[in-house]
Structures are given as C-alpha cells and as structure tokens.
Image (tube, rainbow, N blue to C red):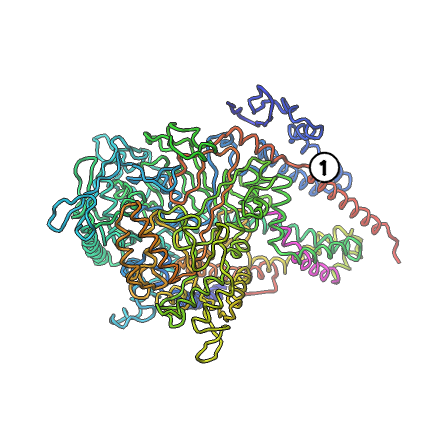
Amino acid sequence: MATAVSGCARVCPGVPGCARVCPGPTAGCRGTGAPFDRLHCLVRGHRSTVFLAIALFAIVTVRRLFSSPATVRALYAGVAIIFSLALGGCGDAWNDPYPKAEQGANILYSSFVDRPKTLDPARAYASDEWAIIQQIYQAPLQYHYLKRPYELLPGAAASMPTVRLYDRGGHLLAADAPAEQVATSEYEIQIRPGIRFQPHPAFAVDEAGGPRYLSLSQTQVARYRELADFPEKGTRELTAADFIYQIKRLAHPRLNSPIYGHLSQYIVGLKELGDRLASDYAHLQTQYQAEHGKADPGYPWIDLRNYPLSGVSQVDRYTYRVRLHGQYPQFQYWLAMPFLSAMPVEADQFHAQRGMNEGRNLTLDWYPVGSGPFMLTRNDPNARMVLTRNPNFQGERYPSEGSAEDRAAGRLNDAGRPLPFLDQVVFSREKESIPLWNKFLQGYYDRAGIAADTFDQAVSVSIDGQASLTPEMQDKGIGLETSVAASTFYLAFNQLDPVVGGAADSARRLRQAISIAIDWEEYIAIFANGRGVAAMGPLPPGIFGFEEGPEGMNPVVYDQVNGQARRKSLETARSLLAQAGFANGRDAASGQPLVLYLDTVNRGPESKAILDWYRRQFARLDIQLEIRLTDWNRFQEKVRAGRTQMFFLGWNADYPDPENFMFLLYGPQSRAKSGGENAANYNNPEFDAMFRQMQNMPNGAARSEVIRRMVRLLQVDAPWAWGYHPKDYSLTQGWLHNLKPGAMVQNTLKYLRIDADLRVQQRARWNRPVLWPLGLAALALVALVLGARTIWRRREQRRAR
Amino acid sequence: MSAWLLRRFAYALVILFAVNLLTFALFFVVNTPDDMARMQLGNKRVSAEAIERWKQEKGYDKPQWFNASASGPGRWTDTLFFEKSVRLFLFDFGNDIDGRSIREEILARMGPSLALAVPVFLVGLAFNITFALGMAFFRGTALDLSGRIACIGLMSVSSLFYIISGQYLVSKVFALVPISGFSGGFDALRFLVLPVAIGVLGGIGAGARFYRTLFLEEIGRDYVRTARAKGLSEWTVMFRHVLRNALIPILTGVVAVIPTLFMGSLLAESFFGIPGLGSYTIDAIQSQDFLVVRSMVFLGSALYIVGLLLTDISYTLVDPRVRLE
C-alpha cells in the first residue's frame, strides 16, 4: 500500500518499490517509456524551473525593449503571480479541484445538482434529499443491497417486525385472517441494543451529568455560529423512544410532513395528535405575539414526549408497537424510509432553542443528527457537502448473498466485512452537465450519470438495443451499470372527458387506437437514447406482479411474433378508430375532423421536436392534435379540476409493491373528485374491488393472479397509453467497487469501496499538464511587443512631411 | 449637496416602493400561495389540509392587498403585501421558504461572487484601457486594424462559447487549472484564473472599442496638439495627457457598475461551480420562493440606485465644472 510523502508528491505508474509516490523530482519516472513521456516527466519534475526560465526570458526581452521602471515593476509582479501559481498548484495534476491533503485518502467523490431543501427526515421526500439523509438516519428496516426483487431486512431493528391482527373486539386473529375481519393491526419492532448516535453537542453533558447545551440563553447561543463551534460533544444509545418521538414529529404542524395526511389514516391516534398539536402550537404563537408585540421569529418548542399517541406505545427500552387502522401490509415499507427513523429528542430540543434559527440556520433541517454510518460534517449546499464516517457506527457487515451476476461483477468480494468502507463522501455541486462530465472523465468524480448530450461519447447501442461502453470509456476502465427504474411515464386520458374518457365502447376503442399509434419504441430510441422499456401496463420490471415475455405482453397494443412483442399495425388502429365512430379521423355523426387536446408543460426549443413527434403520431390516424402549452402551476390546476383531455405524467415508486402503482388508478383516489393520485380519474368498480383484495394479500401465487387480472382489465380499458419505464444508466470509475443500481436502496454509500491508490495513479495519468500553450502565449506576447516596438520606432524616426 | 442627497434619497424610496409593489404583483399573478405550498410540499400525496396548514404556518393565508375582516389600519397592514414587504426597507430580509436566513445566505454567497466579479472588473478595466490605448497609440497602422478586427470578433461570440471552449482547452486538454470548483483563501486563485481570464476576454471587444473611441476623441483636441508642439514624446502625450482626460467618461461609466458586482454572474458561476449570488434569484423563481425573489429584486434595485448616485458624485470629483445642486 502506498504511503503519501508530504510535499510535492509525484506519481510514477508501474515502478516497483516506488510506492507510487516518489520523493525525488523525476525518480522512478522511467516507467513511462516513450521519449516524449520522459521529457514530459522531466518538465513536470522541474515545473517551477521551467516557469522561472520563461519568466526570466520575458523579463530580459522586455527590459531590452523598454526602460520604463513602471513597466519592469509590473512585469516583476506578473512573474511573481505566475510563479506563485506554479508553486501553489504543486501536485500531480494541476487541475485537481480537491485539496492536496485529500490526495490518496479514502474518500468518495460525487456530485449534486440542486441543493436539498431540507434534511429533516420528517419533511424530506425528494431523492436528492434522501441521498444524504439515508446515510445518516437509521430506519428500523432497510432493503437488501444485492437481492432483486427487493427484499426487506432489519436495519436498526433486531429482527423483522412482528405483526398481529385484531378484530373489532380486540381479539387476536390469525395472520391470514380475511381483511374485512381485521379492525386493527399491530407492528411490534425490537431495536438492536448498543446502537449509538453520532457525536453531537446536543448529547454533551456537564460536570453534574446534566445536558450542557440544552438550556442556553439567547446570549449564549449568539456565541456560536456553527455546530463545530460547540467544544463539547456527546452521544447516547438509541432506544425505542427515539422512533416514537419521530412518529409524533410527523404530526407537528410546523414541520408539515408530506406523509402526515397519508399515515394519519392508518396510525391510530396520529390525526388526533396532529389536531391537538396544531391547537397548542397556534396558542403558543399567539401568546408570543401578545407578550412581545410581534410574530415569533423562531418557533416555540413543544416537548412531544408529553403528548400521548394512542396508537404507539413503548414496551421496553428497545421495543415499541405501532397500531394501525385495518390492515396495511405496505406499512413495512414505510418502516424502511427516513420518515420513521430514529430522532433523538435532545437534537430537537437543542435546535429549537431561541436564537438557533434566527440568522444562523442552526436547525435540524440543516444539521441532521443520526446513528447511521455517516454524519454530515460540512453543509454548504451551494458548494460542498461532506459526509464523514460516524465513529459510533458498528455492527453491520457487507451482505454475503447475491446473484451469480453479483458474484461475477465482484460485488460479493467484500462479503462479511464490516461497514462502512469509506472514510468520507464529498458531494460537490455541479449545476451544469458539461463540467460534471469532463471532471468525471478526468477522474475527479467516482461515478456519474449520462446526460443526453454526452450519451454518444459514453455509450454505443447495438442494433438489437444492447448498450455497451465506447472504446474510449473501456480504455479508461470505466464501468456501466444499467437498471430499469421503479417508475413509469405515461399519457393519461382524462376519464371525465366526453371524448376520450368513460367506460363507453367508443371511447375505449379510441384510447386503444391511440395507444397503438404512439410508437413508444421509436420515442425511446430518438429522445431517450434507448434508455427505457416500452410499458405493457402500469407495473415496471422488478415490481412483484410484473410479467416478462409473452405472458406480460399487452395484447391490445402488441402482437406476438416469434415470441417477441410487435406493435400492432396502423390498420388495426384505424379499424379501432372507425369502430369508435371516427373513421379517417372524422366524427361519423357530424363529419367534423377529430381534434384532441394535449396539455403539457414542455416548453422551449428542445421540446419542439418532441411535440412535433407527438403530432405526427396522432396524424398517422388523421387525428389533429392541439397542444396546449402551460406552466406547471396551471397544469396542475387543470388536472386537479379535471379540465384536461390528455396529459403526460410520471410516477416514481415509494416502495417496491404493486399497490404503489395500482393505486394510481384506484377510483377513490380520483384527483378531480378527492384530490388523490389517480390523475386520469379512472373509475372501474371491478378494478377497485380487485385492488382492495390485492393490497392486503401477501406476495404469492394468489396475489399474482389477482394482479394479472387487474393488468388485463387495464390493458383493455386503456386509461393510460402505457408509455415507458426509464432505464437508469450510471458510469463508475474502475477504482469504485460494489456499486449496484437500485432506486429503492438509498443507503448505499456504506457498501461502496474505492481503491484510492489506483485513483491517484489514473488521475495523474489522465491529467498531465500540457505546457507548450503557455510558452506559445509568451512567444506571441513577445512577438506582439516586438512588432509594436518596430512600428513605434518607425513612427518616431519618420521625417516630418 | 446635502439637499441634493436628501432629494435623491426620497426619490430612491419611492422607486424602491414601486419596484416592491411590482415584484409582489407580478409574482402573485404567476404563483398563488397554493402553488407555492404544493411546490414546497412536493407533488406526492399532498392533501388540501396540508396546503392550508402550510399557508397558515408561513403566513400566506392572509389577503394579498386588503383585509376586509380587519379593522382600522389593520385592513392594510394585516395583509400579505405589508407583512412580506415593509421590513425590506430596514434591510430585514427574513427567512426563505425553507426557514433559512436570507441575510446569511446573501452574506455567504457574496464573497465568492465578489472574488470573481472584482478581478474581472479590475483586470478587465486595466486590460481594456491598455488595449484601447495601444490601438489609439498605433492608430492607422496594421496593429490598430488587427486590434479592431479582433475586437469585433470577440464581441460577436457568445460568452457561453468562451466558457465552454475555455474549460475544454485550458482545463481538459491542457489540464492546467480545475474545470470548476471553489475554495477559500489563496487556494481560490487556482479556481479563479480561468473564469477571470474568460470574463476579461469576453469583455475586451466592447470595452476596448469604446475606450479607443474616447481616446481618439481626446487625441484630436487642442491641448494634445500643444503638448506635441512643446516637443513631448508621443508616449508622454498618450499616458500623461490623453489617458488622464479620457478617464473622466470612463470613470463615470464604470462607477455605476461597481455596486452591482455584488449580484454575481449567472453563467460564469454556474459553469465554474462558484457558490455566488448569480443564480440565487433564478433558483428562487424556480422554487417559487417569493421572499428570496423580493429580497434580491429589492437589493438589486437599491444597489443600482446607489450606483447611479455614486456616478453623479464621481462627476463632481473628476470634473470640477460639475456641481450637484
């Protein structure tokens, strides 16, 4: 293993015994071979000397040309700056954006585009927010890192929850009792003893053993600007009470948790707690206003421990129970999300102190406090966020089970080793894709996605749709990971619309005809660089109930040809259109052309091609497509009011269960009628009945059968033109190990390992500074000065005319 | 002078009030408080009750202009406009939609913005003047012609092109400086060399041509002819006489720009990863954060007014014939 030598280290690939870091200027650089390389190495080794030589040459030249002391002084200053820059950049690569001290360190470098809005686990719901907090907060459960379909495992919990079902009389029911008999269900969760929170001032204690920083005056708080300013830190063991506290936080009116409305339908007493908290919180705010004559600049702290929550109880130090209305098997997935992770009351109390928020941003939103493998040690969301290994984290090991593909990819090489592998993870903000891509190619990011404009540079797609890396990427040892996302993108037909909506045969046939005419395979090839799979129904691959091959094919849109799905012909679509009463795109009754309306927020020149493509798809059936461009706010308003005809939407799964997709078409979820997630306002009592049956069933053959019938019904009804399921492509450097894509698994950083020595070598190899442009620029400057001098002299010596 | 300053201050207050009024009206024509709530709460599982609670918590449940249910002055003060705008005049920006201090954010971002904008401004000014002086000095020669052609060429190219090609050549192909990023202290030089160079290069075309015109105008004046008739060298004439007198219009032009340097540069900061103020307003518009939008518009207007004020004052300093009355 290489050991870093302080000072100006130099990389010497392939030199035995050189330990990759050479103390001498050029020692060991013979390994590079070619004469030019040796010259390059020599120049690099004496970079400062080269700079100095160029500078001295420039000084001598200009001094000979001009004798003005001011000019010479300015020249000296310029040389000093160039020289200091040369020394300042002393390292292997001049364009290394990271501090010299980090070279060779066990740090993963990643990037982010948008700054997270919140890091509070009760509020965060976006993927970029979860990418941070899932590494910090521990939920009771987590997903198996390698297994697909996704499998839940204990996280902070010692074992999987025990589920008990009760009838209306409070009697225990069998685990397979019919859903209609179940009045409440109870989850008992036991936490692993010995888990400790990250070091944090909220846990610091004074000499008497009391909390040191939990009752600070506003004057005392004013002394601290950052968390690092608090000299004392402490920790304590995580208990069941911390999970209960976080569940109560979901009902806090100040936090406005996005899932409070949903979970309050299930967790017994959560709604009542929310109402009581709202009332008490409003009272405290009014009280502050009355006492101080102004609105509270901070917020009053409410100790949630004093507020009972009837559906949640603590059994012992490490065990708690959550009681739900009815049966809700999907609750186990929520137990794997940050919403239900552990939150220490001390952290809440610490950050709620007067003065913490005002002008300092010392909030729980900004400074998460968890027990996970990493802790946030630098939070500058405009530039850099740094996760550092939590020294108190222990007890988790790399999984030993995985598929043959995982084994072949080396993802089981670290089986059984303690987690995490990384010391730090640095997220740098990159708003633009071009610098991000170039820095990845230079080795300054360990992984990257692929933007549309760089796709061809990274990936080549064969005729049969197989993606592979370009030779340039392969030469660099870059790897490609692909996976179909647990999401779907679709064209919705508003079922309340008199033309395309409703259960009438004519409308159904019209929807089917359109579904055939829109060639999603072509769309994926043209606009998504082949990164997608045409959808056969609402369920994406990897979700229970999804069927591969001929069994899963949509018989309304596709024919089976040689075992492959082939989109039906336009003649079939035209025939359906005629049956719908719109032969040749004209209303049979009125003779008027059929005009359909698509509401979209796609604006700008880049969207024009897509919108033209949509028009062409409809024109193939002689249907005129009118596109109504609108902004996101008005678009949502129209969808909520049911005042649209067709529109595009997408859905990313919350959890890998078919219920999370099927509920998008469940009647009572109608967006126009109840504000739910069924934006197409699809309403089919037969489907709804099957949905209610399916949602409470355990995964198995019986559930598969119900899902199959639901999908068949949807394929015939065609409330959506089933669009496509996007494919995630990500690139990884050769020194990054164990990365496995999977949208559901977010706490991935603890599994990743890097070979820091290889990274140092590759970065140096890929980023050799090219010095001749500097010399050329200097020569050009000298030539310019000489030319100017000649012209000036001629003019000065010219005789008067 | 003091009466003039007071009058200008009063004008400034009226202008700032009007700007504030306009910002408020335009923002809420496009975004309703319900839209803002949805944007903040996300697009999944948002209930009407959650939206109401958000509006109440953030104070967006009040009438925008006039509160008919209140009494007395409360009809005007217990409104969204009054509550969200009046404290601006005390430069109390409050917190953004996520509850973070806008003042802190501006202060934190101002440094990086200035670290880029000030060198671009100073180096660019020096470079433009030198280049323009050189062209005026060699007027009518091949050097002057080449300089003018180069200026027109530089003016014709988009600044985005300079940024992308500069990053590609200098950082990627030549590997001389980091492509993007930022650091504090002396280390920031590594990150600023390229954006400053590109900023200066992008401004040469327009700046140097304008200054050349000023210098040529001065060169034709009587005092220059007198200086030459005295036997002074062309070098002394240009640097001691022409430059000094041409600085008057240059100075008054650039003073107005100085305060706006605080606002940063959107493109350069985005591409070079400089955590400045350049994109703060755009980000706020995208996230429908009214409090940040109105703060930044207010600050921008105030700085612009200060810039114009400084311009007027600088006239009196560099040209004794001008008096503020």
- State left or right for residue A164 relative to residue A122: left
The number of callouts visible is 1
Q: Quadrant of the C terminus of chain A?
A: bottom right
Which residue reaches farthest left? A169
How far across and how far down the image is residue B305, in percent?
49, 62
Where is residue A742, by image quadrant?
Answer: top left
User: Which residues fall within the magenta stretch?
Assistant: B196-221
Q: As shown in the figure, which amino acid type bears the numbered disc 1?
A: Ile
Which residue reaches farthest top? A17
Q: Residues within 10 Å of mark 1 (few under 14, many from 20)?
A: some
Circle 1 — which element?
Answer: helix
Judging from the image, mark 1 belongs to the subunit labelled A
Instruction: Examine the residues drawn in magenta and state their main secondary structure.
Output: helix
How far across and how far down the image is residue A119, in percent?
35, 46
Is residue B13 at least partly visible in the picture?
A: no
Is B315 situated above or below A180? below
Q: As rendered, which of A59 and A383 lies closer to the eye?
A: A383
Q: Residue at x 51, y 62 (%)?
A: A569
Q: As rendered, which of A578 and B143 lies closer to the eye?
A: A578
Residue tagged 1: A59
How far across and how far down the image is residue A518, in percent?
49, 61
